Amino acid sequence: MKFWLVLCLFITPSLLITAQNINLPTEYIRSTISGEKTLPANVQGSQYPTEEFQQGTVNILDKSFTTLVRYNALSDAFEIKDPTGEITTLLRRPDITVELNGSDYEIEYFIDDNGIRRQGYFQKLNDGDAVFLKRRGVIKQDAVRATNSYGRDKPASLDHYEKYFLKKGDTPAEEVRLKRKDILRQLNNEEVEQFVKKHKFKLKNESEVIQTLEFYNSLNIE
């Protein structure tokens, strides 16, 4: 009896994932994985913050699907894996959100380094009118040959980075550094400045920024 109980505990989650994956709308996925074919053969590093697929939830409109998920930071896309081992990529659409490891990921408009308005995946760190967002990415560094016989060649590499953004209302998110003057300049509110001063926040970590934004959002600023 114990054997069958243990067996059911192992089988049931996989059956649930299978059933949910079958119902995942095909118009929201593509069958090829972007980014991998363009990488040099000897590149160092990975395009994934975590190589392994992990159980997550894909939300499409008013439906949720439990599946195996991982984030491709190079192509800015979520990949899903079905029980047969087939890997597909979720299309980058605003009506798709992903829940993974207790965090919510969604598409947001943002201003990139060149001042261009774009869309991309962000980890949402709080709720409210002013939202603190984290964006992960990868920079491809080209291989560099040694300049003399004493040096060594440097292979091509994938270097991961994290950036923070602040989004207010319906405006595109803008990058912000974890510095007190940068956060306060974007919020531009005297009451928030007094709140930060009272709590002696330096705003150099996520926790202090989130607490500050929670206070800002409580002011019901129009």
Image (cartoon, grey):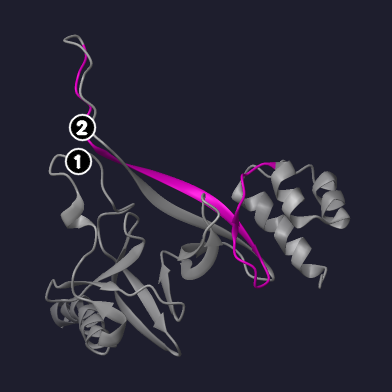
Q: Quadrant for the C terminus, please.
A: bottom right
Residue placed most toward the observer, 35 or 71: 35
Q: Is residue 138 left or right of residue 200?
A: left
Count of labels in the image: 2
Q: Is residue 163 left or right of residue 66?
A: right
Cα separation, mark 1 vs mark 2, equals 6 Å
User: Element under label 2?
Assistant: loop
Residue at screen point 79% across, 69% down: 218
Residue at screen point 51% across, 54% down: 112
Q: Quadrant of residue 202?
A: top right
Residue at screen point 19% across, 23% down: 153
State the residue position of label 1. Answer: 43
Q: Position of residue 166 (x, y in %)?
A: 63, 58
- Image mark for residue 129: none
Q: Which residues are magenta?
A: 151-179
Q: Amino acid at mark 2?
A: Pro
Q: Is residue 141 left or right of residue 3?
A: right
Instruction: Report crowding for label 1: few under 14, some 14 to 19, many 20 or more residues within 10 A (C-alpha).
Output: some
Q: Position of residue 54 (x, y in %)?
A: 30, 65
Q: Position of residue 195 (x, y in %)?
A: 83, 52
